[in-house]
Image (cartoon, rainbow, N blue to C red):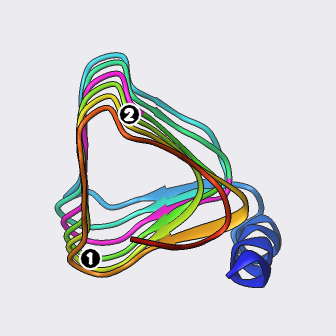
Amino acid sequence: PGDLLAANSKLLQKEIDGRCIVSNEAEIMGDAKITPPCIIGRGVTVGRGARIGAGTVLMDDVSVGAESRVEGSILLYGCSVGRRTMLRNVIAGDRAEIGDEAEIVGDKALVIAPGSRVENNLRVRRDGVYP
């Protein structure tokens, strides 16, 4: 998984020239900040004050809650991220749900299994697969 995130970052930098590609069907709220390179798909919602960092891919129908941060991560179809949550070096499978005020950080990569639920306020700092 760590190699996948590294390849993703290199691909984003090389193939899209360090830009952000944001679908015209995505909704970026208020003062949310998007840092290139990244890709944001159709039906994505990014809440107020959220930060989407370099090397991030948000596939279709992902929602990121207000004041959350997502850095160097890939969130697959239909994932949801709660409010004031931090994700770094994470690959979240289809329809994974990450609760409010969670902190999920991989050293190289942490994979959240498709359909998994990460509880509110949970702190996970490791590589591997969750749960």
| Quarter occupied by the C terminus | bottom left
The circle on residue 85 is 2
Q: Residue 83: x and y, percent?
A: 25, 29
In this orientation, does residue 52 appear? yes
| Quarter occupied by the N terminus | bottom right
Q: Residue 121: x and y, percent?
A: 32, 32
Dominant secondary structure of the residues highlighted in magenta in the image: loop
Q: Confirm or deny contact between disc 1 and disc 2 (CB under 8 A).
A: no
Q: Residue drawn 82% across and 72% down?
A: 10
Give neighbour class at mark 1: few <14, some 14-19, many 20+ (Cα, 10 Å). Answer: many
Give neighbour class at mark 2: few <14, some 14-19, many 20+ (Cα, 10 Å). Answer: many
- The residue that disc 1 covers is 77
Q: Is residue 67 above or below residue 69?
A: above
In this orientation, does residue 27 appear? no
Disc 1 residue type (three-letter): Tyr
What span is colored magenta in the figure?
55-68
Q: Residue drawn 70% across and 73% down?
A: 5
Q: Residue drawn 38% across and 33% down?
A: 85
Q: Residue drawn 35% across and 71% down?
A: 59
Q: Quadrant of residue 130?
A: bottom left
SS of the residue under disc 2: loop
Query: Number of numbered discs present?
Result: 2
Separation of marks 1 and 2 at Cα, in angstroms: 18 Å
SS of the residue under disc 1: loop
